[in-house]
Amino acid sequence: MVGSLTDGLPIDADAATSDARPRLYARYVSTHGTDGADGGVLWARSQVIPRMPDSRTARILDIGCGAGGLVAMLRDDGYQHARGIDISEEQVALAHERGIEGVELADLKGHLSSAPETYDVIVALDVLEHFEPGEVLELLDLVARALKPGGMLLARTPNAGSPFFGRYRYGDLTHGLAFTARSLRQALATTGFEHAEFSSVDPVPHGVLSAARFAVWQLIAGLFKFCLAVETGQLRDHVVTQNIVVTARRSG
């Protein structure tokens, strides 16, 4: 019988997770195969920018901003107080190399703790899945505290309701969770948010081929939703894309 490599060695799972994160984030760009782009310019242009406040003086914070692609887009659109923070030195350095202003190296929990009722909008694209359940609640508490009353959280995260969610959930060693709309609503309601609205992350048509891809995906997604409706008796609000987007407002 082959013995375990850890036979006789006590393993502290929490400590192992804590040690892994800084090690992985320190080389996130070079090991994860990403240049720090924030989820696709076309998607952000069509799905994020339209949800931003009309006022160009709104204070917007992108947490886990990577190389600052969304921050640059917001600033180009005239949002003069848009800024971003990230814990990855490589990604922040890449933002600075690209000349993107407003991107800082910072721990998001520390930053949010020091900024009560500061922001009109906090964006968290591909952030929540990097934490364990207790940490997610702590983070959302801090986000709610850093938002002005009525301020908005916009988050994107792997969707456990998708038949393909594992591609995103397990595509990064720093991921700890995936969510359904129901579990996201539970977390948000627990931490002082209301009016949660969920949407899919569909392909963005921008030409003939992408329009055809979009149309085919709508047919496939419709089939998945039909199957869920038959099983559950629930006819609406099924999201089957690999990621899910939620917007919610801070109570009060």
Image (cartoon, grey):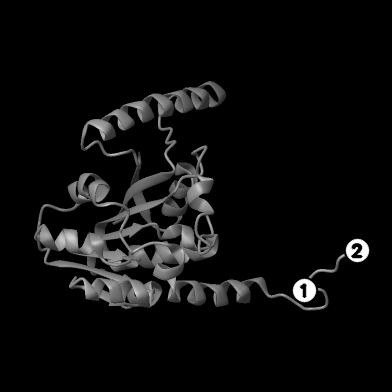
Quarter of the image that includes the C terminus: bottom left
| Residue picked out by circle 1 | 6
Position of residue 204 measured from the top left corner of the image (x, y, whole percent): 27, 39
Residue visible at 27% across and 35% down? 210
Specify few, some or many for label 1: CA neighbours under 10 Å numbering under 14, 14-19, or 20 or more: few
Position of residue 245 measured from the top left corner of the image (x, y, whole percent): 36, 46
From this view, report whether residue 99 is shown above or below residue 190. below
Q: Nearer the viewer, residue 84 or 115?
A: 84
Q: Nearer the viewer, residue 82 or 142?
A: 82
SS type, badge 2: loop
Residue visible at 26% across and 69% down? 84
| Disc 2 residue type (three-letter) | Met
Quarter of the image that includes the N terminus: bottom right
| Disc 1 residue type (three-letter) | Thr
Which disc is residue 1 wearing? Answer: 2
Residue visible at 42% across and 36% down? 239
Viewer-nearest of labels 1 and 2?
Answer: 2
Q: Nearer the viewer, residue 170 or 63?
A: 170
- Left or right of 242? Residue 251 is left
Residue 147 picture quarter: bottom left
